[in-house]
Amino acid sequence: MDKALAELIRISKFVGKDADWTQGGSGNTSVKTAGGKFMFIKASGTALKDMTAKKGWCKINLQAIREIDDKKLNKLPSKKREIEIANRLLAACGDKKNRPSIETNLHAFLGKYVIHLHPIMVCAFLITKKGKAELEKLFADAKSAPLWVSYAKPGYSLAKKIGKLTIRYRKRYGRGPQILFLEKHGLFVSAASTKEALKLVEQVINRCESKINASPLRRRLNREKIIALCAAHDI
Ligand SMILES: [Zn+2]
């Protein structure tokens, strides 16, 4: 088995086992291959924890993904555009049997190991007005400054926004972001190794949880409301 695929399965099973992290198996993961030509990514329709060597992933040609954003797409009405993107994603997928996640383009902009989740404890911050400021304070000492991504509809709009923001981030910091907070949506973590990616996910979620546990927020924590507002749409 390709090393990148084996690592993808390992990280998917690890982050997929906690229901509070995934809200029913949603979220997605990816690992780019050694030469950087391909990316293994979770397919739609399989829960993270259920990924195996045989199912739940796609092998994507990264070059084809990067070419997805073009002027022709910009001119299409949004419904037609999403269909066209889904078709192009499928065309970029090696076996054509599994449908890549609609968030595939986002992964292409980030590092070798990418984990995207909708953890309740992080979403609790992402749905409030003060969430951005609170997260900035909470992660002020982070090795890599978190990138805040204001709300955009998942799919084309979100991918375009993250594409622009990561270019800006790279210009400012000389490297890509490692922690991305997506307003009313979830968390993206990007790292150079499996170990680092998993450590980052745990650190971010634990830090958010500790903050909530130590504040009056704890009593007001409404899981149903958080789940409804931080939609986990991309299983
Ligand atoms: Zn998502």
Image (cartoon, grey):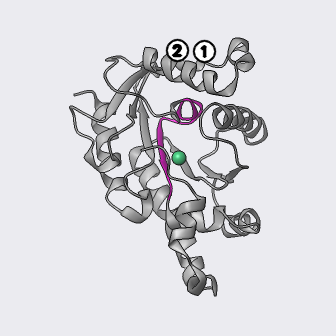
Does the magenta portion include 111?
yes
Image vertical order of residue 209 relative to residue 162, above or below:
below
Confirm or deny contact between disc 1 and disc 2 (CB under 8 A): yes
Residue range highlighted in magenta: 105-118
Q: Amino acid at mark 1?
A: Glu
In the image, taking residue 215 as reference, residue 129 lies left or right, namely right
Q: Quadrant of the C terminus?
A: top left
Report which residue position mark 2 lands on: 64
Q: Residue 221, percent across and down? A: 56, 78
Q: Nearer the viewer, residue 9 or 71?
A: 71
Q: What amino acid type should be assigned to the residue bearing mark 2? A: Ala
Q: 173 left or right of 80?
A: right
The residue drawn where x is 55% and y is 22% is 83
Judging depth in this view, the residue of 132 and 80 nearest the camera is 80
Residue 51, horizontal then vertical, whole percent: 27, 41
Q: Is residue 2 visible?
A: yes
Judging by the rendered image, the residue that carries numbered circle 1 is: 67
Q: Is residue 207 visible?
A: no
Total numbered circles: 2
Q: How many angstroms separate mark 1 from mark 2 (CA)?
A: 5 Å
- Residue 127 sits in which quadrant? bottom right
Residue 198 lies in what quarter of the image? bottom left
- Mark identifier at residue 82: none
The image position of residue 166, as x and y in percent, is 69, 37
Residue at 56% x, 66% y is: 226
Compare residues 37 and 56 and report the one nearer the observer.
Answer: 56
Q: Give the image quarter of residue 28.
A: top left
